[in-house]
Structures are given as C-alpha cells and as structure tokens.
Image: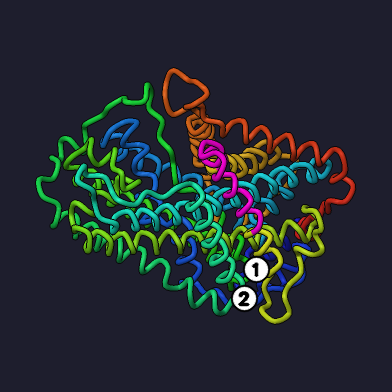
Amino acid sequence: MAALSRQRVMATVEDDDERLLARMGYAQELRREFTQWSTVSHAISILGVLGSVPATFGSPITAGGPATAVWAWLIGSTMALCIASSVAELVSAYPTAGGMYFVAKHVVPPEHVAVWAWVIGWSNFLGQAAGVASLAYSVSQMVLAAAVMTSGQRADGSYSFTPNALQTVLLAILVLCLFGVICSLTTKALHRIVLWFAPINILASVGICIALLVLTPNKQSAKWVFTEVTDGSGFLSVAWTMTDYDGTTHMSEETHDAAIRGPVAIRLAILVSGLVGWMLTVTFCFCLTEYDAIVNTTAGLPVAQIFLNAGGRAGGTAMWFFVILIQFFTGCSAMLANARMTYAFARDNGLPFSDHWSKINPHTGTPLNAVWLVVAFCACLDLLGIGSTRTIYSIFNVTAPALDLSYVAVIVARRVYEHRVPFVDGPYTMGRWSKPVNAVACSWVLFISVILFFPAAWPVDAENMNYAVCVAAAIALFSFGWWWMSAHRHFQNRRSLLLEG
C-alpha cells in the first residue's frame, strides 16, 4: 500500500518535471520552454481545421451532399472528443516524447511489453509521417490552386494554367524542407512561433466565414444545407480529418507541468477545432450556389472556387492565402510532433541507426537528426505521386486509421489487463466516466477505420479501389517481419521506475 501511495504521488507531480521523467527512465535532454498557451496553440494548430476542411471538403460533398458534410463533422467531433479524452487520461500518467508508444509499455504484462510497444511505435511513426507528407502535398496543391485562380480564364471557362504531377511533388518537397528548417530551431524559438498558430487560425476562420456569407450572392437555403443528402458514389463514405490527438504529447519533455497541460490542451483543441470546423463546413455549404460547377471546378478544389465566386480574383486569392498559411502551420506542428516521436522511439533502439537519430544537437538543444529523417522519409513518400496519384492517396489514407488504431490498441490493452497490470493515474482522469468513454472511443475508431478503407465508389474496380488497406497490410507485414527477424534482440524494453517503487 505504501508503494502504491508513493507511485500515485509521483504520477501527480506538477512542479518537478525532470524528477518525474527520471522516474520514467529518461534523463532530461530537451529544454522545457513551452508554456500553457504555446502547448494549447500547438494542439489546435496540429488539427488545423482552416486548412483541412477546405482541402477535404470535396469528398463528403461529392459522396453524400451538404447534410452529410455538416452532420458528419458534428458527430465526428463528438466522437473525437471521446478519443482525445481517453488519450489525454493515459498520457497524463506518463508524459514523455514517446506519447502513446511509451504508455503501451505500462498497460500490458511484462512478457508482452516489447512487441506491443514495437507495433504501437511503428504505427504511430508511420501514421504521423504519412500525415506530414499529405500536409506538404496539400499545401503544394493549394499553392498551385492559387496559381490557377490568378492565371486567367480562356473563352471556354477553363483556366490557362493547369499544374501537373511533377510540379505538385517538387513543390511538396520544397514545403517539407521549409517545415524542417522551422522545426530545426531551438525550443524557445519554436515556442514563440507556435504561440501565434492558433490565434491566426481562429481569427482567420471567423473572418473568412463572415466575408463569404456577406459576399456570396444567392446563397443556398438552410433547409438544403441541413437536409439535402445524395448518394453519388454508390454508398456514403465520410473521411474524418481530425486525428493525431496525441501530437501535443510528443512535446511533453519540452513543456512545464506536462502531465496537466498536455491533456488540457488535447481536449481544448478538439472542442475549439470541432466548433470552428463545423462553422466552416456550414458556411461553405451555404455558399455552394452553383453546385455542379463548384464541385467540378478546374481550380482543383471546390472551396477555391467558392472563394473566387465570393471575392473575385483578388478577394478569393486573399482568403485562399490564409487557408494555405494555416495548412502550413499544421504541417509544421505535425512534423514537430513526428520528429519528437522519432527521437523518443530511436532512444529505445526502435529505428535503424538509432544512436544517430536520437542525438541532441548541442547548439539548438533539439533532435535535428530526427527532424531531417522525417523530412527525407516524407519526401520519399511524396515522390510516389509522380508515378501514381492513386498510390500516394492510398498512403495518405492510412494516416487516420494507423494513428487511431494505435490509440485504441493501448486503450483496449489497459482495460483487458487492468487486473494484472496496475495503472497509476495522472493528474487528469475521467474517474467513473473513463470506461464508458473508452468504450465509445474504441467503437467509433473501429467503425471509422473500416469506412476509411472502403472504396470511394461502387462497383469496385482497379481504378476506384481504395488501396489504403493494401498499404496498411504491407506496413503491418514489414513491422512484424522485422521484429521477428532481428528487432526483438536489440529493442529496449524500458519500463518506468514508477512501477518498481
């Protein structure tokens, strides 16, 4: 009983982050420069709804009409809050740069820890990397869409400039390098930059919604927006864009009072992003004045055409600039989280040449090698877009299922083994609501993961097949194969001293 009491005291330390980290088996190598507000800003920006909603708006609109987009976002936001709350409760107990990968070591029996941590770590790393690559690719698409918007129109209504696959990929790689340069800065510099991400995101979202509703003529009716459902693809398939809930957790070793601020930031980010994203979705639906023309626009993205219709070339481009800027912020935040997770995974020998990737640069005090590993890996993923657009979208589609399933695996493991493995609650806990919220989160993730692996149209053929399931299977085969061939001999089964008294 005395030992358990000591564990609980250590798990709720708020003013001695280094001592808590040491009891979890790690030395303090990174500098704790993130404050409460920069942590919240990072959590909101990593979801980046002003960038993600315009980038993905065409999918639910085409598949199910305006009501599908509106209500799917609202329902999905509620479910996302359940997942985020479940994740926040777990990482509050073990706030490290490894995030859910490290938590996995403390919810399963000792004999299963290594393989569980290995699989969760790789799922998280690859899911985040695919997300970063897709963000850079979407920024490239948005920039080129802006070029299309300003290129002028021919007599037949088409635009004079049409980007090709090579241009899109090369620009995406340039964007990745810019992400890398920013993420290579000191933690203090990153704190000062990230601090502005969320305010700009929220203010720009509100401003754009007001401008669109004022400037768009002949807006759709409320009845059409909230009740019109179509089935243009054979069956409905709603793509969920808000994920990477534990992204801010990867900054735990650079945050003061991380056991409290991280979980609070995660839940607050979902609440704010859910409301802002729904506001944007409803506004865009009201502005679908010429449905077919907007959905099939040669500008590349339907929202780009909505901006053009409302503000003309100058006003539309100005609004589109903020969408690009927010998507760029999201990419920076996602790469920052991915680099820290890479660093944490490497210090436990989870990657090839781990000693190199886990090094801390003496000048910046940050893991520069891990940052540029992420840049290089994501660039390789984006290069696939030159040869096959279908392949690269299949890789991008793995992001949400890979991340969400890695969360659910840890949540389920905690519940399955809770009578065998003692779990030390952190400062943030849901108490008696924990189990029902966990159950809702797991049910939703299993459901949406199946949906995200569905083809976009029916009947299914080689052209419209969703190859994300093939990519996921290949990743799983690689991860397990490498584990059984060699990784199990050198991967560190590091467990927290909290469970050793």
Residue drawn at x 26%, y 37% is 66
Name of the residue lying farthest toward the top: 459
Q: Look at mark 2 in the image and give the residue it sits on.
A: 32
Could you tell me residue 299's position as x and y percent? 31, 48
Residue 276 in the figure: left or right of residue 462:
left
Tags 1 and 2 touching, CB below 8 Å: yes
> Main SS type for the magenta part?
helix
Judge whether residue 370 is colored magenta: no
Could you tell me residue 219's position as x and y percent? 13, 45
Viewer-side residue, 93 vs 486: 486
Could you tell me residue 385's position as x and y percent? 54, 44
First reached walking from the N terminus: tag 1 or tag 2: 2
Label 1: which secondary element: helix
Residue drawn at x 30%, y 45% is 302
Residue drawn at x 65%, y 62% is 340
Magenta segment: 376-395
- Distance between mark 1 and mark 2 Cα atoms: 6 Å
The quarter of the rendered structure image containing the C terminus is bottom right
Q: Amino acid at mark 2?
A: Arg
Name of the residue lying farthest toward the front: 155
Name of the residue lying farthest toward the right: 489
Q: Which mark is residue 410?
A: none
Q: Look at mark 1 in the image and give the residue it sits on.
A: 253
- Colouring style: rainbow
Q: Is residue 365 visible?
A: yes
**Quadrant of res 8:** bottom right
Q: Amino acid at mark 1?
A: Glu
Label 2: which secondary element: loop
Q: Residues within 10 Å of mark 2 (few under 14, many from 20)?
A: many
Residue 406 in the figure: left or right of residue 493:
left
